Image (cartoon, grey):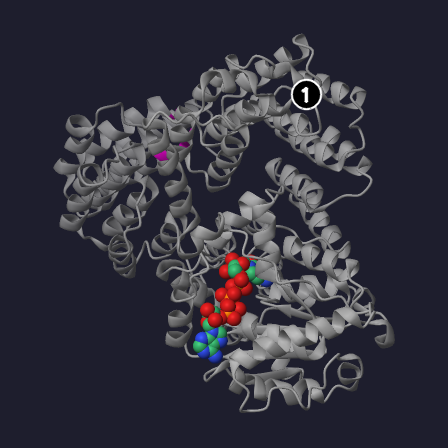
Amino acid sequence: LTLNQAASGLKVGESFATDIIKPEERVLPPKEKAPFITFVLGGPGSGKGTQCEKIVETFGLQHLSAGDLLRREIAMHTENGAMILNLIKDGKIVPSEVTVKLIQKELESSDNRKFLIDGFPRTEENRVAFERIIRADPDVVLFFDCPEEEMVKRVLNRNQGRIDDNITTMKKRLKIFNALNRPVIDYYKNKGKLYTINAVGTVDDIFQHVLPIFNSFEQLKESSHVNPQSHLGPSLKPRHHQQLKQHRQNEYNNSGFTSLSFTKPSPTPLLIGKQSIHRTQLEALDSVITDLETSAQKGISITEPEIFASLLETCYSLRAIDHGVRVHHLIPPYLLRNNVGISSKLVRLYASCGFAEVAHEVFDRMSKRESSPFAWNSLISGYAELGQYEDAMALYFQMAEDGVKPDRFTFPRVLKACGGIGSVQIGEAIHRDLVKAGFGYDVYVLNALVDMYAKCGDIVKARNVFYMIPNKDYVSWNSMLTGYLHHGLLHEALDIFRLMVQNGIEPDKVAISSVLARVLSFKHGRQLHGWVIRRGMEWELSVANALIVLYSKRGQLDQACFIFDQMLERDTVSWNAIISVHSKDSNGFKYFEQMQRADAKPDGITFVSVLSLCANTGMVEDGERLFSLMSKEYGINPKMEHYACMVNLYGRAGMMEEAYSMIVQEMEFEAGPTVWGALLYACYLHGNTDIGEVAAQRLFELEPDNEHNFELLMRIYSKAKRAEDVERVRQMLVDRGLET
Ligand SMILES: Nc1ncnc2c1ncn2[C@@H]1O[C@H](COP(=O)(O)OP(=O)(O)OP(=O)(O)O)[C@@H](O)[C@H]1O
Ligand SMILES: Nc1ccn([C@@H]2O[C@H](COP(=O)(O)O)[C@@H](O)[C@H]2O)c(=O)n1
């Protein structure tokens, strides 16, 4: 089944979308003003980029490669750089909002009105975000259709040092392409805009199939600076092609014609210098550091601050802490003490890799740390990420004492720490500070303020700040939504969700999965599911996990299993969800075994599910084996719930002695109501009055107000035909005021 089939098979109601996306919002600008847009699709390594270069030469379109734009963000260490790096490394799709904004910037800053947007849209979510933000539709969609083995071969031979050109990431990219890009291709096919090109053959042969497509558009022929009809006859060899390219470029440069802008293809930014062309960035980094170490051993001292600054920057972007430590050892101590730039970068590296203590040591040795808030911010952030909120707060207060002026990056970090501590009073003080410092209208800072107030339990203040934010971005909306959910205010959360969509803001996957997990009405849940499918977000890990729970809560096991089986990646939460769906049938075992084979790590919750399954299906020996496996193999110490499962397992099987001795001999802590309750229920099932009396006695002490325990004991006596005892327990109920 393709995802599209899956989506239509679900027959999910459309009403959510029609409710929240107004058709008038989708009105596109008049056609004559719209740029000519071509989307270039195809699997990784299908040759999109190569063909785009040729289209640019011939028809003068501007080439925008979504992948290159994202890689440029990494190389420039922008706010999103690290996040993008992590996603690309894993072959995952970057949030649409980010990619579309990058494309938008390029479109808006170009004089050209004809664009080749390559590697985009990758998902339905990408597509919808483009329509919403750019308000334009493509005129042409090219799809380079290439067999997987050919794509793998091309990518592995590409040798451009791209971090994602390796077999492991390639497999993931292909999986994601098949799952998420195919529906987009189908979409354009149905709209009659798709041109499928067989991408096997020589570059020139393939281009011969591309030419007629563009030739059929008059506006392209008019302004192309070469004659496309005469370009690249079948016999023209690549060598000639290069010469021709140069010649045309010269002609163009001399023509004084400026209305078409041809951006130079940007170099792949994940490279370090030219020598790294055959390596990954980490290998290149390693090699540079090794060279420096060798020089240092030979007594050649390296003192150029720029070298260390650049190396530390790369270590930070790759979170390569081991390499960072080696660079640290190479930096002369006087340089580290006196050069704020280098020491600050080192502090940031240690702090961002979870070594806040080491970062603090470097920080303490800095001679001019009051000259900039950079190192302070890094350290505050490092502590906040580790949950050491008091340390983060202390640094903030120390900043003020040392006369360091906080900047817009300080406040979100310290507010995060404050949210962790949960103190509204301190939060209000920071709120005053940030207003005084002139950040009272800064969206980035105000978003953190909303989050802080919500986490500190003051949802009213959170809401007040939220409504004051002048240009709310998607973080603002998501913070408010999460705040409401955190406070159990589901209706308010759903209102925000609707408003978000009405305002063209995409709720993020955390917000969506949180809403799905808490949604009370199944109708709303299904509508949300439909909406999620249309956004192409169904297979986001947290969203898919929440959907499994949604359907299993409603007993729609087939649907839950379908989602699980189609998931591209799974975590322990996914496995737990699907095993617990099957906690009453032996399929749960199948999934548990599959989980073990997949090397996924079970946790305590997994074992509660499998042990319950054993109890429900009478698989005593398996239960015993799993109980022992849990601690021996996985190092999970049994908790109250696991003992309750074992008592239930033995109890249901009528093994009352074993159940009882599990409590009195095996347990290393006092048994609670769940454990005694399981024993009492088993006594009722098997008519065991003696053990039942002991269990009931303990339960009366532990839960004096729980009438169900009294009722169960009465039933046990009643089964044993002990009417007097039944009456005695009833009287106990009356005496305690529990009889209804
Ligand atoms: N027709 C072809 N035959 C053989 N190799 C090709 C062909 N077209 C491109 N290549 C080579 O295959 C590799 C991948 O091509 P290209 O970078 O154009 O693919 P892409 O679809 O843009 O990839 P990605 O989506 O990963 O960026 C490059 O090394 C390129 O030189
Ligand atoms: N619309 C897009 C395009 C790309 N990405 C990410 O970049 C990686 C590389 O893309 P190429 O087109 O250069 O192969 C890709 O695997 C994605 O991680 C994206 O997220 N969204």
Query: Circle 1 sits in a helix, a strand or a loop, which is it?
Result: helix
Residue at the (71%, 29%) spot, across then down = 408
Label 1 CB-ligand 2 distance < 8 A? no
User: Which percent across, then down, holds residue 453?
Assistant: 68, 28
- Quick check: 5 above or below 500? below
The answer to whether any part of residue 7 appears in the image is no
Q: Amino acid at mark 1?
A: Gly
Left or right of 352? Residue 525 is: right
Q: Which residue is mark 1?
A: 427
Is residue 736 found inside the magenta-colored segment of the image? no
Left or right of 495? Residue 233 is: left
Left or right of 588? Residue 224 is: right
Is residue 707 found inside the magenta-colored segment of the image? yes
- Quick check: 160 above or below 363? below
Q: Residue furthest top?
A: 401
Viewer-proximal residue, 260 or 650? Answer: 260
Viewer-proximal residue, 83 or 386? Answer: 83
The quadrant where residue 150 appears: bottom left
User: Which percent across, then down, holds residue 731?
Assistant: 37, 27
Q: Which residues are magenta?
A: 703-709
- Image quadrant in which the N terminus is located: bottom left
Residue at the (37%, 56%) spot, across then down = 578
Viewer-proximal residue, 718 or 413? Answer: 413
* Mark 1, other Cα within 10 Å: few <14 / some 14–19 / many ≥20: many
The quadrant where residue 416 appears: top right
User: Which percent across, then down, holds residue 221?
Assistant: 76, 85
